[in-house]
Structures are given as structure tokens and as C-alpha cells.
């Protein structure tokens, strides 16, 4: 019987439970990390690390839009410190997390992440 990656990744909150770590995600799924990476990439067309980053940054944006401080968001998303979180956020979204006008524009326009080209497991 083969491993069905869709069944594994349909578990709600899996990225958070894995602390956004590919190794911990593979451990939670009961698969060795390398085999998990191969299955994931073959099925979704992206690496599990890229998916976890996307989930993490989607959650970060939601928390910031809800008014949480940057330091609290960094801690909740398991970044080592606020600097590393700010750097990753800026690389992913194109603006720093402390830039309130950009966050307010997103909130006002109800802007969301565009639909992916490849079907992806849900982040939530």
C-alpha cells in the first residue's frame, strides 16, 4: 500500500504542528524526509519547504493584518527573532512587515494570494 500524500496533508494545522519544518512534517507523516520531499514534489510540483514558507507567510500576513505586533508574529511562527522574520517577510511579499500603508492597502482591497498553478495542499 502506497502513501497518499493528499491524505496526509489534508490534516488541518499540519504546517503549524510541524513548526514549519520539513523534517518535523515528514516525522509527523511517518515518512523519511527525503522520501517525503520526493513524493511532495512529484505530486505538487514544488518542494515541501517552499509550501511551508508559503503557509508561514500567508499566516504572517493574516496575523499582521489582524494587528499583532511583529515580534509576536515572529515568535508564533517559530522564527529565531524578529529580524529573520522581517527579512523573510520582505523577500516573500515585497515589502517589510512594518510598512503600515502596504498592509492597510491589502486590508482595504481584500487582496489575496492568487490561485496556484499546481494544486497545493491547504495551508490551514
Image (cartoon, grey):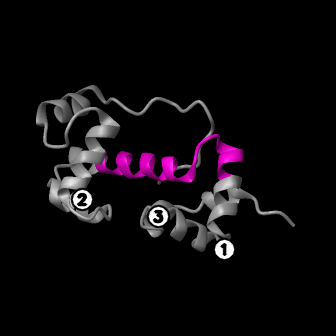
Residue at mark 2: 74
Q: How far apart are marks 2 and 1 (CA)?
A: 28 Å
Around disc 1, counting alpha carbons within 10 Å, would you say few (fewer than 14), some (14 to 19), or many (20 or more)? few
Label whose residue precedes the other's in the sequence (2 or 1): 1
| Residue at disc 1, secondary structure | loop
Q: What stretch is highlighted in magenta?
A: 40-61
- Left or right of 69 on screen, residue 121: right
* Disc 2 and disc 1 in contact, CB within 8 angstroms: no
- Name the foreground residue: 100 vs 22: 22
| Residue at disc 2, secondary structure | helix
Instruction: Say which quarter of the image contains residue 29.
Output: bottom right
Residue 5: numbered disc: none
Around disc 2, counting alpha carbons within 10 Å, would you say few (fewer than 14), some (14 to 19), or many (20 or more)? some
For image coordinates 54% across by 33% down, the residue present is 116
Residue at mark 3: 21
Label whose residue precedes the other's in the sequence (3 or 2): 3
Q: Residue most toward the right? A: 1
Instruction: Say which quarter of the image contains residue 106.
Output: top left
Residue at mark 1: 30
- Left or right of 35 on screen, residue 100: left
Does residue 66 lie above or below 96 as drawn? below
Residue 54 in picture, x, y percent from top left: 44, 45
Q: Distance between the residues labelled 3 and 2?
A: 15 Å
Around disc 3, counting alpha carbons within 10 Å, would you say few (fewer than 14), some (14 to 19), or many (20 or more)? some
| Residue at disc 3, secondary structure | loop
Amino acid at each position: 500500500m502506497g502513501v497518499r500524500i493528499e491524505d496526509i496533508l489534508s490534516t488541518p494545522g499540519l504546517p503549524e504542528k510541524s513548526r514549519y519544518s520539513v523534517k518535523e512534517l515528514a516525522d509527523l507523516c511517518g515518512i523519511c524526509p527525503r522520501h517525503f520531499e520526493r513524493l511532495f514534489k512529484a505530486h505538487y510540483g514544488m518542494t515541501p519547504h517552499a509550501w511551508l514558507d508559503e503557509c508561514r507567510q500567508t499566516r504572517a500576513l493574516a496575523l499582521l493584518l489582524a494587528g499583532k505586533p511583529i515580534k509576536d508574529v515572529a515568535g508564533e511562527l517559530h522564527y529565531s527573532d524578529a529580524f529573520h522574520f522581517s527579512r523573510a517577510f520582505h523577500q516573500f511579499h515585497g515589502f517589510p512587515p512594518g510598512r503600515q500603508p502596504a498592509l492597510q492597502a491589502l486590508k482595504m482591497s481584500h487582496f489575496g494570494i492568487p490561485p496556484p498553478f499546481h494544486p497545493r495542499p491547504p495551508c490551514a
